[in-house]
Image: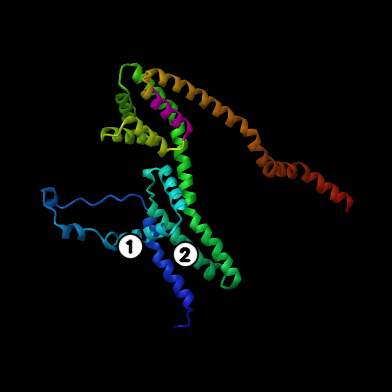
């Protein structure tokens, strides 16, 4: 039809169809529009509640969620659990969910195949190879983004933990209970660790025991110092040890570890500087110093 190959038409259709999928997968949490006045007064009109959402919320999002759930059921359990772990480490504020990640992986993988076959390779063996490489890259891109976000969040928690522990120690030694000190630190703090502490307090308020809440906190993070801290608190609660003494010991240990980590990073700097020196600075320096001499030697010989 009109002399256009069917492969090009199919590729264009796939690209157009992937735009809303990618928009839904990479978008963050959406704030809902306020309810009508009838809902505020105690009466909710279901028809109006449904119609106030656009076609994206009524049709496209449920369809994409169903497709993502189907992809999750077809994927191996180990892959799905690893992806869920990366989503947990990335944190709730990242906007990622398992369904969004699966949808993004599916669309980017299929889009990479179509782009490689029709756009980059132009068909044939080269097109198949390019499509395979782009499909693998597109399929792995959400994992890379999640790992990067998770590493940044864990480093943020690790950096903020010593100061938070010092505040907890001071508050408990001043006479506050552990839960009250934790609530004060969570209310005055900000960042990933403060969010995790607020979630910990929320679990305790709804009836979860402190030991279980601390274990959940350890499972949601991948910071070794925080795990040691939660284990020490669990043992202190189990054996009846003074919380203030445990906090003081943990605080001093964290300060030592922070200093050791800073010394380790400082010792790595000379090794990291070698490659920029050899590849970038030394060649330019040799050109500046030896260039005029080599020009004079060549002119003299010729």
Q: Which residue is mark 2?
A: 110
Q: What's the colour scheme? A: rainbow
Q: Residues within 10 Å of mark 2 (few under 14, many from 20)?
A: many
Q: Earlier in the sequence, mark 1 or mark 2?
A: 1
Q: What segment carries the magenta color?
A: 223-236
Residue 145: x, y in percent?
47, 49
Q: Is residue 191 visible?
A: no
Question: In this view of the protein, which residue sits in the foreground, 137 or 212?
Answer: 212
Q: Which mark is residue 104?
A: none
Magenta stretch containing residue 234, yes or no?
A: yes
Magenta stretch containing residue 255, yes or no?
A: no
Answer with left or right where residue 248 lies relative to residue 122: left
- The secondary element bearing badge 2 is classed as helix
Residue drawn at x 44%, y 46% is 86
Residue 253: x, y in percent?
49, 22
Residue drawn at x 55%, y 64% is 132
Residue drawn at x 37%, y 24% is 238
Residue 291: x, y in percent?
77, 46
Q: Is residue 55 above or below residue 168?
A: below
The residue positioned farthest toward the right in the image shown: 301
| Distance of label 1 from label 2 (alpha carbons) | 17 Å
Residue drawn at x 45%, y 83% is 2
Answer with left or right where residue 158 lies relative to residue 173: right
Residue 14: x, y in percent?
43, 68
- The secondary element bearing badge 1 is classed as helix
Answer with left or right where residue 209 lies relative to residue 8: left
Q: Which mark is residue 63?
A: 1
- Magenta region's main secondary structure? helix
Q: Is residue 130 visible?
A: yes
- The quadrant of the rendering that contains the C terminus is bottom right
């Amino acid at each position: 039809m009109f002399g256009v190959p069917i492969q090009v038409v199919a590729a264009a259709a796939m690209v157009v169809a992937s735009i809303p999928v990618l928009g839904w997968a990479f978008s963050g949490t959406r704030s809902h529009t306020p309810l009508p006045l009838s809902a505020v007064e105690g009466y909710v009109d279901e028809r109006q509640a449904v119609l106030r959402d656009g076609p994206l919320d009524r049709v496209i999002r449920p369809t994409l969620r169903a497709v993502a759930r189907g992809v999750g059921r077809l994927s191996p359990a180990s892959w799905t659990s690893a992806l869920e772990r990366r989503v947990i480490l990335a944190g709730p504020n990242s906007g990622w969910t398992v369904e969004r990640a699966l949808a993004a992986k599916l669309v980017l993988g299929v889009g990479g195949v179509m782009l490689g076959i029709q756009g980059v390779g132009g068909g044939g063996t080269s097109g198949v190879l390019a499509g395979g490489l782009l499909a693998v890259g597109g399929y792995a891109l959400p994992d890379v983004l999640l790992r990067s976000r998770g590493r940044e969040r864990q480093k943020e928690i690790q950096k903020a933990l010593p100061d938070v522990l010092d505040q907890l120690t001071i508050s408990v030694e001043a006479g506050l209970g552990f839960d009250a000190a934790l609530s004060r630190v969570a209310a005055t703090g900000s960042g990933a660790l403060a969010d995790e502490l607020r979630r910990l307090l929320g679990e305790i308020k709804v009836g979860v025991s402190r030991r279980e809440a601390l274990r959940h906190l350890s499972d949601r993070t991948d910071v070794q110092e925080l795990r040691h801290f939660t284990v020490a608190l669990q043992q202190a609660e189990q054996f009846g040890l003074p919380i203030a003494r445990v906090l003081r010991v943990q605080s001093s240990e964290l300060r030592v570890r922070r200093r050791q980590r800073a010394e380790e990073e400082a010792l790595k700097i000379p090794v990291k500087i070698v490659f920029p020196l050899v590849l970038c600075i030394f060649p330019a320096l040799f050109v500046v110093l030896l260039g005029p001499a080599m020009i004079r030697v060549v002119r003299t010989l010729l």
